[in-house]
Amino acid sequence: GDSVTQMEGPVTLSEEAFLTINCTYTATGYPSLFWYVQYPGEGLQLLLKATKADDKGSNKGFEATYRKETTSFHLEKGSVQVSDSAVYFCALMEYNFNKFYFGSGTKLNVKP
Amino acid sequence: EADIYQTPRYLVIGTGKKITLECSQTMGHDKMYWYQQDPGMELHLIHYSYGVNSTEKGDLSSESTVSRIRTEHFPLTLESARPSHTSQYLCASSFPGTLNNEQFFGPGTRLTVL
């Protein structure tokens, strides 16, 4: 079945460090891929998405490229800020089955 | 910004009480979902609906029930709350199509059962 695997956290970085959060997926068809962010005490917010292979999603300095050959959708940011501290979820939606699959979440702590 | 609302945001109740968690969206989305989020952060789908009068159980077995009488409203009910129901509950909605298909989330209800 379809699934999403993302790196375990917590990830702790200093401000202005480079961020990578790995995400790989298993899907039978042609999924859309998403990154969501959850700030403390809030629901999930869509951060970026990509709907087909080689698409790059980007928002607020974050970006991720849909790599079909490696079934990956790694999240990157060149210079993190304290305000980026949150939990990040990778997700996929399978077109044929119209169902969402979330990864287990990666907590990011950014220290000043 | 997504227009999906959940009330209450926080609820502390005693064992055995009946509770209803409210979820409403003003985006006209056909599909709505309830997730339970455990302290380890992982999301578990407990109920979903594809439209009015449609409700399905999700991947995680839950003692809660849902109803979908109106498109914009998807309440979740616990007939008799227990401490094991203590969790964060997140409501979400989406369009049924394949392009603009992301889920929009409400702010969540944090439930504590004593």
Image: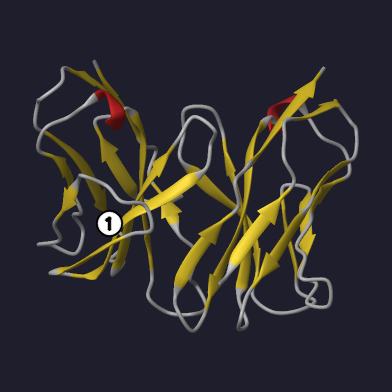
Front residue (pair B112, B103): B112
Which residue appears at 13% of the width and 57% of the height? B67
Give residue A53's quadrant in the image: bottom right
Q: B104 or B77: nearer the eye?
A: B77
Q: Image check: B3 left or right of A111?
A: left
Amino acid type at circle 1 is: Thr
Q: Element under label 1?
A: loop
What residue lies at 60% left-to-right and 76% top-to-bottom?
A31
Task: Give the vertical position of B95 relative to B82 (above or below).
Answer: below
Quadrant occupied by the N terminus of chain A: bottom right
Q: Is residue B9 visible?
A: no
Q: How many marks?
A: 1
Q: Which residue appears at 45% of the width and 40% of the height? A: A43
Q: Position of residue A35 (x, y in %)?
A: 64, 54
- Locate residue B64: give its quadrant: top left
- Quadrant of image for the C terminus of chain A: top right
Relative to B47, is A19 above or below? above
Q: Residues within 10 Å of mark 1 (few under 14, many from 20)?
A: few
Q: Is residue B50 above or below residue A58?
A: below
Residue A3 visible, this angle = yes
What colour scheme does the image use? Answer: secondary structure
Residue identified by numbered label 1: B26
Corner quadrant of residue A16? top right
- Please indicate whether residue A82 sits to the left or right of residue B8 in the image: right
In the image, taking residue B86 as reference, residue A55 lies left or right, namely right
Left or right: A26, with A67 as reference point: left
Percent position of residue B21, x then y: 20, 38
x, y (%) of residue A25?
A: 69, 65
| Residue found at x 49% / y 64% | A100
Chain of the residue where label 1 is placed in the rendered structure = B
